[in-house]
């Protein structure tokens, strides 16, 4: 468990890397209850304009949350989390979640983090999540 | 989408935070302890099929993508507790053929105390020209 006293503005969170497999996407559909065919059927995904099945945005956001949880050590200390979804994540791609401490408030023992999820495609970095925010309140 | 749908509230639905569901969800993210921050998505998807299929909304689900997602936690969700899901349509906007739907889902204790507010913006992409 991380201590509030050790948190400083500008601190980078360790990146969390994940290869998103078709099995991961199916596992998320089953655990999260979102059985939209866009995430399981290549033909449906192509009809919607994607090259193939895409991951749930919530799988990507859950990975971003996992990055914050690994850093602070306790999911119960997260009091706010938000994400803007941009680039869709295709099956087989590698996503990297990261973040940085942007504010700390000693009065409420709260840290505000900028967070993001990126991926590399065609030699370019794409943002799967941009303008992510996490609010962490320390005991 | 129909802007008149703004303000629609759905009847509350029971949601059991079953430890088996929490562990299955946490397993996807390799989280060994506690309730993952995005676990309320399970509650959201308990009611979203009803919302998406609501004729008063006129949503073409085949063109919908997830735009933004926001959670505010009043307190941590506890494994094994029973909560109520309260869903409402907060906003419907259509600009240049693109629809923006904001759905708010609150998880509340049976007595009414707020636990989590989940706010989703869904984008209905323009129909092919």
Image (cartoon, coloured by chain):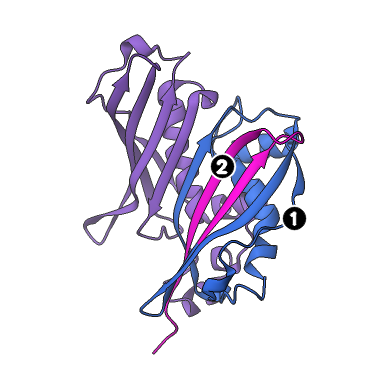
In the image, taking residue A103 as reference, residue A52 lies left or right, namely right
Spatial CA distance of label 1 from label 2 is 16 Å
Query: Please, which chain is the residue tagged with disc 1 on?
Result: B
Query: Please, which chain is the residue tagged with disc 2 on?
Result: B
Specify the chain shown as purple: A
The reply to whether the C-beta atoms of the residues labelled 1 and 2 are less than 8 Å apart is no
At a point 33% along the width and 32% down the height, the residue shown is A113
Disc 2: CA contacts within 10 A as few (<14), some (14-19) or many (>=20): many
Taking A10 as reference, is A63 above or below it?
below
Taking A98 as reference, is A122 above or below it?
below
Q: Can the viewer see residue A115 in this picture? A: yes
Can residue B125 be found in the magenta stretch? yes
Q: Which residue is mark 2?
A: B117
Disc 1: CA contacts within 10 A as few (<14), some (14-19) or many (>=20): few
Q: Earlier in the sequence, mark 1 or mark 2?
A: 1
At a point 70% along the width and 29% down the height, the residue shown is B79
Magenta residues, as a range? B102-129
Extreme-bottom residue of the structure: B129
- Which of B30/B106 is in front? B106
From the image, state the color of chain B: blue
In the image, taking residue B20 as reference, residue B26 lies left or right, namely left
Give the number of the disc on residue A126: none
At a point 58% along the width and 64% down the height, the residue shown is A40
Give the number of the disc on residue B11: 1
Q: Position of residue A76 (x, y in %)?
A: 55, 25
């Amino acid at each position: 468990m991380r201590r509030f006293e050790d948190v400083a503005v500008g601190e980078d969170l360790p990146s969390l890397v994940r290869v998103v497999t078709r099995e991961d996407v199916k596992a998320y559909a089953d655990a999260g209850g979102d059985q939209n065919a866009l995430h399981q059927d290549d033909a449906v995904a192509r009809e919607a304009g994607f090259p193939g099945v895409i991951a749930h945005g919530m799988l990507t956001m859950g990975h971003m949350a996992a990055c914050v949880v690994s850093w602070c050590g306790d999911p119960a200390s997260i009091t706010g989390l938000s994400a803007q979804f941009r680039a869709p994540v295709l099956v087989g791609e590698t996503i990297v979640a990261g973040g940085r401490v942007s504010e700390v408030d000693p009065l409420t023992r709260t840290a505000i983090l900028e967070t993001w999820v990126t991926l590399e495609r065609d030699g370019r970095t794409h943002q799967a999540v941009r303008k992510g925010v996490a609010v962490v309140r320390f005991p | 989408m129909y802007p008149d749908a703004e303000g629609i509230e759905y009847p509350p639905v029971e949601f059991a935070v079953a430890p088996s569901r929490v562990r299955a969800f946490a397993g996807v993210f390799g989280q060994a302890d506690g309730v993952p921050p995005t676990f309320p998505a399970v509650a959201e998807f308990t009611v979203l099929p009803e919302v998406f299929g609501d004729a008063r909304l006129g949503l073409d689900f085949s063109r919908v993508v997830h735009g933004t997602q926001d959670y505010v936690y009043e307190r941590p969700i506890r494994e094994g507790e029973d909560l109520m899901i309260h869903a409402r349509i907060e906003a419907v906007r259509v600009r240049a053929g693109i629809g923006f739907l904001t759905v708010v889902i609150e998880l509340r204790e049976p007595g009414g105390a707020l636990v989590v507010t989940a706010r989703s913006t869904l984008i209905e992409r323009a129909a092919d020209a």
